[in-house]
Every structure is written in C-alpha cells, then in structure tokens.
Amino acid sequence: MIDLGKKNLLGVNVSAVDYEAAVAKIIDAAENRYALGVSALAVHGVMTGAMDDMHRHRLNELELIVPDGQPVRWALNLLHGTALPDRVYGPNLMLKTCAEAAQKGLGIFLFGGKQALLDDLQSKLFEKFPNLKISGTMPSRFRKITPDEKLEIIQAIKTSGAAITMVGLGCPRQEVWAYEFKDDLRMPVLAVGAAFNFHAGQLPQAPIWMQRFGLEWFYRFTKEPTRLWQRYLVLNPYYLTLVFLQWSKLRKFDPTSTTPPDHEILYG
C-alpha cells in the first residue's frame, strides 16, 4: 500500500496513493459514515484548478484526489520524488471500489447521465459483481437545480441505504457536485466521469498500451475531436509548461491561494 499524503501540483493537492490505499480510504469512510470527496484527475482536471482559484478551493477541499492520468503521475514523481509505479485510473478505481463494496455488503448510489445509461451501467456492474448492492440511481437533470431540489436529492440518496455515491457529470461539474454534496451526505462521493460511459459499454476505452504511455488523451481526441480539441491541444502543452515552471521554481503555486465560493452552483 502506498500513501504518501497530498502533494502540490500546480496549486492542486493531489494524493500520492495507489489503488489499495485509495480503496481503503473510501471503504473506511463508507463504513464509518463520514464525508469523503473523491476525484480522479487527469491533466484537464488539474488545469481546471490551476486556472481558477475558486475551483481550486473546491478541489483542495476534497479529501482524496488521485492521479488519474499518467502525466499527473509523472509530474508527482518529478516534482516530489514519489516514485509512484502506476496511476490510479478513475474507471478502475470505480470497479475496485464496487468489488470491495460487494464483498462488504455496502450499497452504492449512481448519480448522473441519462436513465438509459444508468440502466446499462447497472446491468454491466451486476454481470461483474453479482453480489453488488445498487441502492438507487438518479439521472442528471442536465441543468442547475434549486436548493429544494438539492435537498430532495440528498434525501433520496440517504434514504436509499447507500454507503457510497458515484457521480458521473463530467469534469468539472462532478467535482463541484462532490464539493457541494459530500458534507450533507456524510459518505464517500466519487466523481468518476466517463467511467459510467465506459462501463456501460457506450464509450470505448483506449488500448492498454496507449494508456500505459500516456496517450489515452489522443485516443479520446480521435473519438470526439469537436468536443475535446481545446482540452487536449491547448491545455496539454500549457500543463507541461506550468509543470516545468514549478519544477524549475520559476513560479510558485500555492495551494492555499484560493477563493472560497460565495454561493453554490448546484449542478444536477
């Protein structure tokens, strides 16, 4: 098990952990009913925090941010000497959490996406984990919600008997959701993004060799160029530039230099 604590990456506190440590933290929070905001961040996710001090505050209030992308793992190893042997890939973290939850009888709640996606996802998860307890699902409204609707969502999740909530709203909406809901839910809230689509069989994952060499971004770009061109062709070079500046100490990135949000966004 590897747990080297949180490390500063462009002002975002990323946990230098492996799968075993991450899952252990999630299960402990589920069994003991305390808030644990979890996100798996690749380059795009880290950059949302690096470029926006209000969102950086939200990210740094999450208790567990794992290095989802190989470039994030490489940066931790370069900047902090963590020697992490592998990333903690969000879709795999979701499956490992489901496996442990099934073994321990802990229910999960799936929030986000369309109902058809959630139906497919449930079927696929039951195929992998016959003993998994899915306490409930709720599709996204694909709009901002009212404070009353937030209370309704909280009530639905809490009364479902779930011990873990998994959220698939896409980055950065799902991280905002985790930040705004985790303390009321008092359970692990995992922002897992495209993992819903991958595991439901609606979106193909990159070949393992591309994932290993940090080329998953290129594979996804070829599948959705119109939506992802700016994320990858603009943000990736900018990320490398900022990592160089942090490594060379030409620029300071302070995780405490943030602006707390003065209101909730309430994505739903």
Image (tube, rainbow, N blue to C red):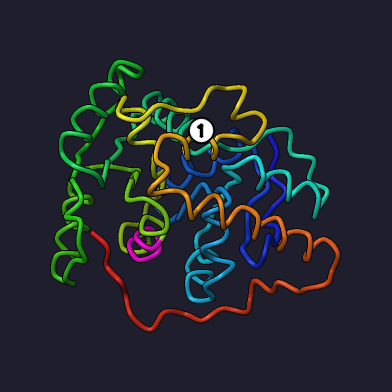
The local secondary structure at tag 1 comes to helix
Q: Which residues are magenta?
A: 176-181
- At horizontal 77% and vertical 73% (from top left) the residue drawn is 251
- Where does label 1 land, which residue? 219
Relative to 3, is 213 above or below? above
Q: Position of residue 110 (x, y in %)?
A: 27, 41
In the picture shown, does residue 162 fall above or below 11?
Answer: above
Locate residue 172 relative to residue 24 in the image: left or right: left
**Residue name at image x 32 percent, y 62 percent:** 181
Q: Is residue 38 magenta?
A: no
Q: Position of residue 49 (x, y in %)?
A: 54, 66
Q: Where is residue 97, by image quadrant?
A: top left
Which residue shows up at 33% across the image and 80% down it?
A: 263
The quadrant of the rendering that contains the N terminus is top right
Q: Residues within 10 Å of mark 1 (few under 14, many from 20)?
A: some
Residue type at tag 1: Tyr
Q: Dividing the image into 4 quarters, which one contains the C terminus?
A: bottom left
Picture residue at 67% right of the left edge, 45% below the top:
71
Position of residue 68 relative to residue 12, above or below, is above
Query: Left or right: 139 with respect to 231?
Result: left
Q: Which secondary structure type mostly characterizes the magenta part of the structure? A: helix
